[in-house]
Amino acid sequence: MQRKNAQKACDEPGGMNLAQPLENLESEVTTCRRCPRLVEWRERVAREKRRAYREEEYWARPVPGFGDGNACVLAVGLAPGAHGSNRTGRMFTGDASGDFLYPALYRAGFADRPKSIARGDGLALRGLFLTAVCRCAPPENKLTPEEIGNCIPYLREEFRLLEEIRLIVPLGRIAYDAVVRLVLSPDSLQKPPPFSHGALWRVREIHRTRQEPLWVLASYHPSRQNTQTGRLTRVMFDHIWRKASRIAREGQ
């Protein structure tokens, strides 16, 4: 029943056909070489590979966002994993974070299957677009402020194109900080709450032509460090996506 609700939330006709603008942005993202340290790392990982994937050809490029062009929900992660998205070419695919995320999206109705294997496996997201703060795998999963600044324009452009977005779900503190920069102007008087799992707030500023309210719902990142220690449980994560479905469906 929950899967039907989430799909219905964004089934209403959107505005322009977003396929071409999103394809153009994807082409720009995947050819980006703005950050020398990240370019060197992602390509070195693809050459050296992990033993379990030594027969596979790594993607080894920036990873674009993907999902429903008329999405009501925008989920924002941190960056591709070296042997996950940097290998498969799809956000949250090929590592433990994705193995925790996609079943949750499926249970909430945002995905048509509980497992993501690689680009081209037929998986479809419904009412949700999945992206990240940065598009290249960073060494030790650590990004510099300059690298984040180089990549934020891609996130901003996705947000601009996806005019039906009613809710943004940042996964982790860094994603949360980036989303705050995305939705609030530097001189904004609105003070968002500190990052915490489940923090929910409404953006009072209107940056686009749409009239629907815009909400932000924070979640811990589904990293192995969080899920294996119990900091983020299945129950906690399902609660986030059930609430996301309700906000997308009802606007509050």
Image (cartoon, rainbow, N blue to C red):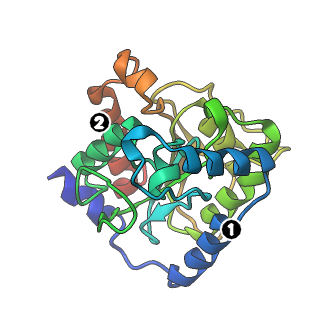
68 shown above or below 133: below
Depth check: give the residue in front, 33 or 101: 33
| Mark 2: few/some/many CA within 10 Å (<14, 14-19, 20+) | some
**Residue 25 shown left or right of residue 115 in the figure:** right
Q: x, y (%) of residue 23?
A: 56, 77
| Mark 1: few/some/many CA within 10 Å (<14, 14-19, 20+) | few
Depth check: give the residue in front, 113 or 62: 62
Q: Residue at x 32, y 40 (%)?
A: 99
- Which residue carries the number 2 mark? 238
Residue 156 is drawn in which quadrant? bottom right
Q: Residue at x 79, y 57 (%)?
A: 34
- Which residue carries the number 1 mark? 31
Is there a contact, CB below 8 Å, between mark 1 and mark 2?
Answer: no
**Residue 101 shown left or right of residue 37 in the figure:** left
Q: x, y (%) of residue 4?
A: 20, 60
Q: Amino acid at mark 1?
A: Thr
Q: x, y (%) of residue 58?
A: 50, 56
Element at label 1? loop
Please indicate, yes or no, whether residue 136 appears anywhere in the rendered image. Answer: no
198 shown above or below 87: above
Q: Amino acid at mark 2?
A: Asp
